[in-house]
Structure formats: structure tokens, C-alpha cells
Amino acid sequence: MNRRLKRKTTPGSSSAGVGARPGLEPAWASYGPTDVPYLRTFFRRLAPAWLDHVALLRGFAPPARKRGLTWCELGCGQGVTPVFLAATHPDGRFFGIDAMAAHIHHARQLAREAGIQNAVFHEADFAAARGLDLPKLDYIVAHGVYSWIDSDSQEALRRIIDERLARGGLVYVSYNALPGWAQDLALRQVLFEFGRSLKGDGVTRVTAAARTVAALVGAQAPALRGSRAKALAEFDRHYLAHEYLGSSWRPLYVTELRAAMAKIGLVPVGSAQLVQNYDSFMLGQAARKALEGIDDDDLRELARDVLLDNGFRSDVFTRGARRLDETERICRLNESSFMLAKPAAAIAFDAATPGGTLKFDNDASRRIIAELAGGPRRLTSIRRGSVSRRDLLANALTLCAAEALWPVEPRGAPARGLVEAIYDRLGGPAELLFLPLPSGTAVAAEPGLLRRLRDGLSLDDYPGWRDFLAAHGFGASAAETGKANVGKR
């Protein structure tokens, strides 16, 4: 539950109010309210190409995918990410596991609406999920789950990974981290204790508890200074209920998580927050110097988190992945495919980072942006001109760290059925404000933009989007942006 990703969105769901089966409720209730569904959100960092990129950055061979791929999300919420990935990776098999009946109901319904056959969803807590008939998995992801569940559930989650991870597979675990969460501990305790003392569903209780917080902030409570108490109104209440009302919520130090994963043979790879893989982007000179001489990787990472006051981590692990020499690593990065994260005209050539302002306004970056404006492609296919191959790669990686570029699949798979389902849901209680792209990811889209696409209207009110979407197979003219041409290349 990334602290920076859960701002207000359209609340509710057609499944709102549907809880988990009675037999599942006690185990899952410690995670959070079972009477309120979680947000319908696509997380691009869970995509196979994104995780492969992290592996290559850090010198590990990604899963080979010789016979397609297998991917599973533990705690899949409403199933948006696995459905979107299944739609854009037809050669893969995707699985979602969640203990809330409302979540699994929505995931299965969305897959049916989109005509998706390669996504399977299981309603089970993690202990029960160990008995499911799952294949060996190339990718196992758990976003915003691990630090919200009790120790028994954490152990069951690790056992699933231990038993199902294919050799050389990748594991993603995101979690609330210390020391960054320390400043919000008092805020969390007030919301939790007041919330559980009240009646009503999770949204009702957290909303009432938030009013108590507001009163404390108004009285200038010292314990809430520096916390995000003043920003509570900016967050969706469904998110706040799941974030704060679970009894097992506990942020972790990186050394705690790594020690637990080491017990099942997992070794750290890197961070799915791409900028976090670069000390030079994250840390000033004095901070980098403070890390010199710390040879133990885990202790160094702990010290690094202290320097950054890190509050959320998106860690990637592997077991048995082949280490790449530098020549092969560079070669495979050059063969990777990338896309623009937004219309070309909207991309800035600098980005603020904890280490300062990252600037990349140069010939190599501008050439990359100009070439990718025509659609996703391999780095080796970009015309370099006078730019060296080394500079091209260095700037592509910098653009990825700044999230101006995204690593994506080299081959496209249009998701016409899913796009139709998104259009059909517009304006309803379960609308999805994302567009799946053939390159194996999705982009957030405003309702007005989606309506114009659905109805074949001009996109002039959305500068740059007509060309951006045309580069991903959506019709370039107003007459071509309707349903009949969705996803055509």
C-alpha cells in the first residue's frame, strides 16, 4: 500500500459490502476490514517486463520464458493487475489469490466481461492457498500485504513462495518500512484504536476516526507533527480503512524482511522503484561517503534507509537466477524494449530526487524520446546518429529511473475485450480508469478521455494523447478511435 499511490479515486464497487466467507474471516480480519473492498488499481511495477528490468539492472538473468510465463499475485485485491496482465500476455498463465470474497468476485467478473481465459482466481487465505493446484511460478508478487498480516500469515506466504517459485524466478514484496513510518505511528494508533471502538463498516469507522485526528491536529498535538495527519482528506477512504484498521499492521526494517526471505533461499535483487537502484540519484555526497566501508549488503541497506528515512519498499528477490557478466548484462539491456510513460510533449528533462535534481536534457535523451514517440521499441532499434551506444543506454536507464520511460514487452498483444469492458463500465460504480496497452502494461486515463475514445470523438482537449495512443495501436483519427478499431496495429 504505497503511501504515494493511494490518493482519492472513484470509491466503492459493485461488490461493496460483501465480506469473506465466515471460515476465512478470522484470519483475514487482522489484515483489515472485510466489509470494504480495496481500490481497483493497476500496478505497473508488477508487470513481468518491469521485474525483468530490475533483474537486468542488478546483473541477474530474468526468467527464460521458453514456454510462456507463469505469474501469481498473493493478495490480489480486486484482481485488476492480473486481469490486465493476462489480457496483454496471452502466452502467460496468471493467478490471483485473495481471502476476501468481494475481491475474487470482482476479479472473476472482470475476466468474464473481458473474455479472458488465462487468469484464474482463488478465494483463500495464505494457509489454505498452500493446498491449491498451482504450477511452478516464474513471478510471485505481493503488493501491500506483507506488513499488514500476522506472523502466521507471513509464514504461510513465505511457504507458498518456497514451494511454488520456479528456479530463477522473481519475487516482489512491497511493505511499509522503517524508519520512514516512525513519524506516523501515533497517527496510525489513533485511527486504529478509535476506528475499532466505533460501529459501522470500515469506511464509516475510519472517516469518524479521521475527525478525531483533525481535532488533535487543530490542537497542535506534538506527536502528529511531521506525520501525514493533515493530508488524510486527500486519500480515498477505502484505502485508509485497509491501511489503518488492521490489527496486525507493523512496518518492517529491511533487515527483518531480508532475514525472513533468506530462510527460504531468496537473495535480494533490487528495487522495483527503479530510482532506488542508484545511490548517485538518491544520496548526496556526504550520505554516499557515510556508506563507504559497510561491506555487509544487508547492513548497508539498513543504513541507506536511515539516510533516506525510507517509509515504503518494493523489494525484488530471486532464487537460483544466473548471474550475468557485465558484457551480457549490457547486451541484454540494449535489447530490452521501452515506451514513453506519457505523451512526448509532457515529458520533462529533469526530476527531483532525494539526492537533488536529476537532469537529462541532452542529445541522447531527446533522441530516445523522439524515437519512442512512434511507439515502444528495442533500444537497439533507435537510430543513434552521433550518440554512442553507451550514452544511449545510460540515458535510457536515467529516463526509466525518472519514470519518463517504462520497460515493456518486445511484442504487442492488443486487449480488445478488456478495453470494451472498460468502456462499458464508464460512469458506473465499478469503472476502471486505465487503458491496457499491447506492450504488456497499462496507462491511467481520465474518464473524459475514455469516453471520447469510446465514442470516437476528437481528442483535441487532451494534448498529445491522440498521437500517444496511436503509437500503441489505437486509431489516430477521431473516426478510428471507436470500439471497432481498439487495439489494431
Image (cartoon, rainbow, N blue to C red):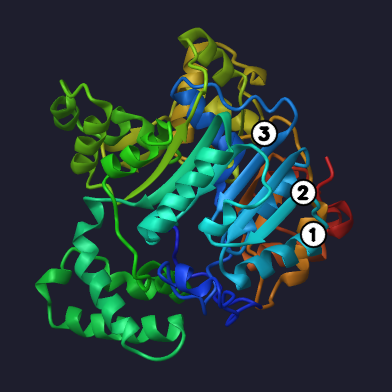
Residue 94 in percent (x, y) is at 68, 47
Disc 1, SS: helix
In the rendered structure, the answer to whether residue 237 lies left or right of residue 344 reads left
- Indicate the quadrant containing the C terminus: top left, top right, bottom left or bottom right: top right
Q: CA distance from mark 2 to mark 3?
A: 18 Å
Residue identified by numbered label 3: 409
Q: Return the mark for residue 308.
A: none
The disc labelled 3 sits on which kind of residue? Glu
Task: Tell me, yes or no, if residue 382 can be seen here.
Answer: yes
Q: State the residue lying farthest toward the bottom.
A: 199
Residue 211 in percent (x, y) is at 29, 85
Q: Nearer the viewer, mark 2 or mark 3?
A: 2
Q: Which residue is pictured at 68% across the width and 40% down the height?
A: 135
The disc labelled 1 sits on which kind of residue? Ala
Residue 280, picture quadrant: top left
- Indicate the quadrant containing the N terminus: top left, top right, bottom left or bottom right: bottom left
Residue identified by numbered label 1: 114
Q: Is residue 88 above or below residue 290?
A: below
Q: Is residue 11 above or below residue 479?
A: below
Disc 2, SS: loop
Q: Return the mark for residue 118.
A: 2
Q: Which residue is pictured at 63% across the width and 32% down the height?
A: 372
Contact flag, marks 2 and 3 (Cβ < 8 Å): no
Earlier in the chain: of badge 1 and badge 3, it is 1
Q: Which residue is pictured at 63% across the width and 58% down the height?
A: 80
Q: Nearer the viewer, mark 1 or mark 3?
A: 1
In front here: 140 or 381? 140
In front here: 469 or 116? 116
